[in-house]
Amino acid sequence: MDFYRLIDKYKWFLRLLIPYVLFIFLALLLGWLIYERTLVLVDKEAKVNNLHLLQQVKTTLDGRLSEIDTIVMQAANDPKIVRLQQLNNPFEGTNTYKIWATQKDLYNFSISNNFILNYLIFYRNSNIVIAPTLLYESEKFYRNVLNYNDLNYEQWHELFFEKNNRKGYFPASEATYLGKPHSIVTYRHPLGNLPGQALGSIIVLIDNNQILKLLGGLDIKDGGWTYIADEQGNVITSTGEYVQLAPGTLKGNEGYIEESRLTNGKVITYSRSAVNGWFYVLAQSPQVVLEKVNYIKRITFITALIFLIIGIVLAYFFTYRNSKPLKKIMNTIRDRFQGETDRTYDAYRFIDDAVSRLIDNNQALQDEIEKQAPLLRATFFERLLKGDFVAGNEIMSLLKHQNLSVEVKSAAAAIVNFAPKDAYDEVILKELDRQRVIIKEMLRAHQQQSVYYHDAAEDMIVLLFLESELTPDSCKHKMEDLFARMRDVSRSPFDLNLNIAAGGVYESLLDVSRSYGEAKHALNFILRQQRTGIVWFYDLPQISDSHYYPGEIETRLMNHAKAGDMDEVNALLDDVYERNFVQRNLSPSIQRLLIYDMAGSLMKLREQLSIEESDNVKSLLNQADSSEELSEAFRYAGEIYAGICRRTNERKKSQNVRLLENIIHCLQTLYMNPDLNLDAAADRMGISKVYMSHFFKEQAGVNFSDYLENLRMDKARVLLADTTLTVNQIAQQTGYNSANSFCRAFKRINGISATAYRGSAGGINTG
């Protein structure tokens, strides 16, 4: 009886409380259903993302290994390198010169690859090791230059030089190279065609740390690991304590293996190279793979619990507040008018006044809420564009709260950009404000209820298309019509270009952030190509998964920079820019890899030219890491190349002046020697006669032979005029073997004979 009496006492309160609680439980039930679907999608996304990262590592490493193999094959077939295979006594007779000439030619096969520490050639018959800057007997080389921590000399010699005649890679090993510790992956390519034994080997020392940097982007926390194995399953390099899988378990070119006893409880993602058959394997703890899923799960349960508690408290509060005035009214009516039926009118009036006060208070609260609506809507749109929402129930609730349509059949994003041709000033900023107002008024005038705008920057408006009735194709047509009207109404007297970049149209509201990302990519493409107008992401060139920067282009670029040839450097850079930023539609990550490769080239170039400062290369890497517009970083790399060319030309100019002074001094002091000619002067200067001839003509403006002959004639005229020496004596003192050859040369140069010149010397000298 007490229980029923309690219910009867609070029956009005319970009637108001129960709908609140039911509504909260229904919302939570809907959120749970959406959460279950989200778990599946996030799990799939995590696996696809891991596979994409592995493929990027594979593509980069395949390119580097192909470059190494190409250069090694060229070196293995070089006649000079092949000729030394039969050499037995390397330091007897002319053999020393042959070795020196071959070592000098090794610079032609310099490997422009930041993965490479060095490469060397071993010859079995002569037992010597040659590198571009090194020449040792093999035992001294192993003792002084390179030694592996877990191998003595005999083991090293047998492993790399005594095995069968096959090329291959040896797993990463700890070694000391040039006095510093390194982790090295060794590549062996045999020399010679004997079936059982090679006549030598080309050994390439690959920096394992560079390979591990590629693997550094993979998430292997909580006991995960990754490794790269060759096609026989031999592990080349690895991170973490791995479990080696048999190649037969990795079926197909790529795939996934769920956690099991075979994988030691790890989730496996793998990809196989189509170039060399290598396996790229990533193992992660299920907690890492499902990190987002577990995070969503925790957030969902915590949020649901908090909302449930808050909802019940608020339901109790609002129920109590709403029931209290009614209870007060009823009690007042009962106290004041009990048994007084003749005062019914006053009772009604009292009730009306009380209800009016409640309505006035609610209206004031509603007005305050309306003032906050634009700010809340802007915050909602910003989160939607960033992709902060992962569950549909949260979006549905916010859509209702913002009085937006809950049913969305088509969703898309576009960016309206006003690009001034000059720098921003007060006039341009006011014009940007005016253009934004024009666009927004046009949307209101055409009653575009399903199109919403969000101010992203001074010169940028983001448009959101949330269609509840139109299909994606119809939505796209509507967007095209709207863009055309925007172009018509946006006519500025100032130099403003209206650019509109549109992303794809999707059926899910959660994909708005994806459409926005595509729109940003399209806008960057417009600005990079210096275009104007309307561009759809679908119309962009297909995104390429690799950049254009082959080894031969890098080598030519470095060689022309070392020569100071700015025109050729600019031509090569223009070609690389055209192929990567114009002809190809590269993703930002691939563009960043291109800048990293160019920075590596610049570091090698600085090392070869002995340029110590590297601040500008560090600035280039900082730009690559922080900038979204990587074409600007590419242009900065071009500026660095220009600085290197200027410095090289300044060095060459200084060296040319000294060389010309030395040549002229040589001629001034040795002109009386009849054996002095182009060959003799070139040998004395230590340069080739062809270079000597071209250099002297370029710097002095006259041929070498003409300059020497004129110098001898100048001396001869002085001796004829001021001395009593015979013509034969003058010929000997001016570098002629006989008087006849001197006389013929003198008459050819001066137009008169030497005797006639002596007779009229006074007149000629004064004239």
Image (tube, grey):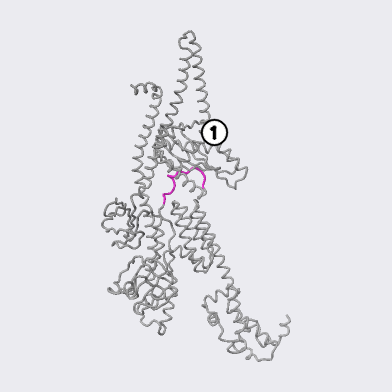
Q: Nearer the viewer, residue 595 or 87?
A: 595
Magenta range: 531-543
Considering only vertical position in the picture, is 601 above or below 487? below
Query: At which x and y percent is residue 484?
Result: 50, 38
The x and y percentages for residue 327 are: 45, 20
Q: How many marks?
A: 1
Q: Position of residue 401 (x, y in %)?
A: 45, 32
* Residue that badge 1 annotates: 441
Task: Verify whether residue 487 appears in magenta.
Answer: no
Callout 1 crowding tier (Cα within 10 Å): few <14, some 14–19, many ≥20: few
Farthest residue, direction top: 342
Looking at the image, residue 431 lies above or below residue 343: below
Tell which of 711 and 290 is nearer to you: 290
For residue 283, side relative to residue 759 (left or right) = left
Which residue does the image show at 35% across and 75% down from the upper left? 153
Front-lying residue, 118 or 717: 118
Q: Amino acid at mark 1?
A: Glu
Instruction: Judge whether 311 appears above or below 624 on screen.
Output: above
Query: Looking at the image, which residue is at 32% across and 68% down?
Result: 167
Q: Residue at x 45, y 60 (%)?
A: 597
Q: Is residue 535 magenta?
A: yes
Where is residue 99, by image quadrant? Answer: bottom left
Residue 716: x and y in percent read: 65, 85
Q: Quadrant of the C terminus?
A: bottom right
